[in-house]
């Protein structure tokens, strides 16, 4: 069986490793011992460091948070790149931006390692079910080697270019839409609460009509939950700090391309407010509470 090393066992990495373990020989590393134990329970071999997870000349799948973690996993102490060696293959599922991916590909190529740029979208549940959207930028030969792994994870696999960085470019556009849609959903729920409307009813009703979106239907129920009896039990499916990072990538890309992105820039400020408020580890749906604090009362339309 093909040997795959998964580096990063967070919200996306753990279900990814678990999904792959049904088809491949999978080893994995995460800085958290608890996450490694969860992976072991799912049939994944835990490793004590990135290098120990790797088979020489094999496949490494990166599912870490950002560029800094990508570089640490590959080039840090006991990094995977040296153990992977010539003819190795790195599959980058993390979102780090087009320029960072191109730079990374050039560095790996110097050691005879190919990079398949394959950022993913869909969330943890879809990762575990093999139902992800994966957008790929890669040359034909490394893509062919990575294809069985990607096919195991994706229900939609779109090859958008032949160069590393092309997949990241498409993911940047994806995150622009996703980030703006979450922010728009938060504004809608906040306004509905000010009118005295029930948040759950608002989300369910609008999700069925022309104003509906995936983000409203997905994040909306958790936004509504933030105002109910179980507000402290909102599940963290996508951390807020992911959109702090990703909207930064979006706005930086727009600036470099000389494309004005006023809606993306406004949404970025909302996530930054959440970051300043200490909400990084909370679900990204929690930005609604910045606009409409749970203790706020409806506006009386007869006043003023």
Image (cartoon, rainbow, N blue to C red):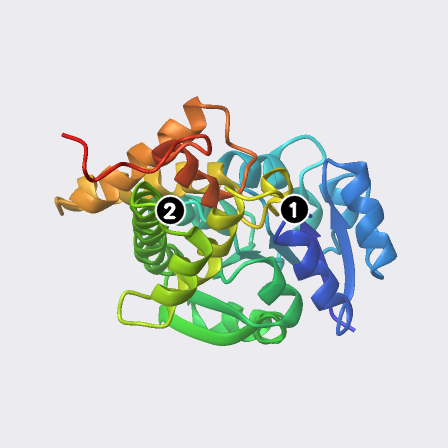
Q: Which residue is mark 2?
A: 97
Percent position (x, y) of residue 224?
Answer: 48, 49
Element type at mark 2: loop
Which comes before the other along the chain, label 2 or label 1?
A: 1
Which residue is depicted at the point 67% across and 44% down?
80
Q: Which quarter of the rendered picture does the C terminus lie within?
A: top left
Classify mark 2: residues with Cα within 10 Å, few (<14), some (14-19) or many (20+): many
- Residue 206 appears left or right of 87: left
Percent position (x, y) of residue 238?
Answer: 53, 48
Q: Is residue 232 or residue 108 the one in the foreground?
A: 232
What label does residue 281 carry, if any? none
Q: Is residue 55 or residue 210 the one in the foreground?
A: 210
Element type at mark 1: loop
Percent position (x, y) of residue 98?
Answer: 35, 49
53 is higher (above) or lower (below) than 209: above
Verify CB contact (< 8 Å) between mark 2 and mark 1. Answer: no
- Residue 201 appears left or right of 190: right
Q: Which residue is mark 1?
A: 10
Percent position (x, y) of residue 277?
Answer: 45, 23
Classify mark 1: residues with Cα within 10 Å, few (<14), some (14-19) or many (20+): some
- How many numbered discs? 2
Which residue is depicted at the point 38% across and 46% down?
97
Front tag of 2 and 1: 1
Q: Which quarter of the rendered picture does the N terminus lie within?
A: bottom right
């Amino acid at each position: 069986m093909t040997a795959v090393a998964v580096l990063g066992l967070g919200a996306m990495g753990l279900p990814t490793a678990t999904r792959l373990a049904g088809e491949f020989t999978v080893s994995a590393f995460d800085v958290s011992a608890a996450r490694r134990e969860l992976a072991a329970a799912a049939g994944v071999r835990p490793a004590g460091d990135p290098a120990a997870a790797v088979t020489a000349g094999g496949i490494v799948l990166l599912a870490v948070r950002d560029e800094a973690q990508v570089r640490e996993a590959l080039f840090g102490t006991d990094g995977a790149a040296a153990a992977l060696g010539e003819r190795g293959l790195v599959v980058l599922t993390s979102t780090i931006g087009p320029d960072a991916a191109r730079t990374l590909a050039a560095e790996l190529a110097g050691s005879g390692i190919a990079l398949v740029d394959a950022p993913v979208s869909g969330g943890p549940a879809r990762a575990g079910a093999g139902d992800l959207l994966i957008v790929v930028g890669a040359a034909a030969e490394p893509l062919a080697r990575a294809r069985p792994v990607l096919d195991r994870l994706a229900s939609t696999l779109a090859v958008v270019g032949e160069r590393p960085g092309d997949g990241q470019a498409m993911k940047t556009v994806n995150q622009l839409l996703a980030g703006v849609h979450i922010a728009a959903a938060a504004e809608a729920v906040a306004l509905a609460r000010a009118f005295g409307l029930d948040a759950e009813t608002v989300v369910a009703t609008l999700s069925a009509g022309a104003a509906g979106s995936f983000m409203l239907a997905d994040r909306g129920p958790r936004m509504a939950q933030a105002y109910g009896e179980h507000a402290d039990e909102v599940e963290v499916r996508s951390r807020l700090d992911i959109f702090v990072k990703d909207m930064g990538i979006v706005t930086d890309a727009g600036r470099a391309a000389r494309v004005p992105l006023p809606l993306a820039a406004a949404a970025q400020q909302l996530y930054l407010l959440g970051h300043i408020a200490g909400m990084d580890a909370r679900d990204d749906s929690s930005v609604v509470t910045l606009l409409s604090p749970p203790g706020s009362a409806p506006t009386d339309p007869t006043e003023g």
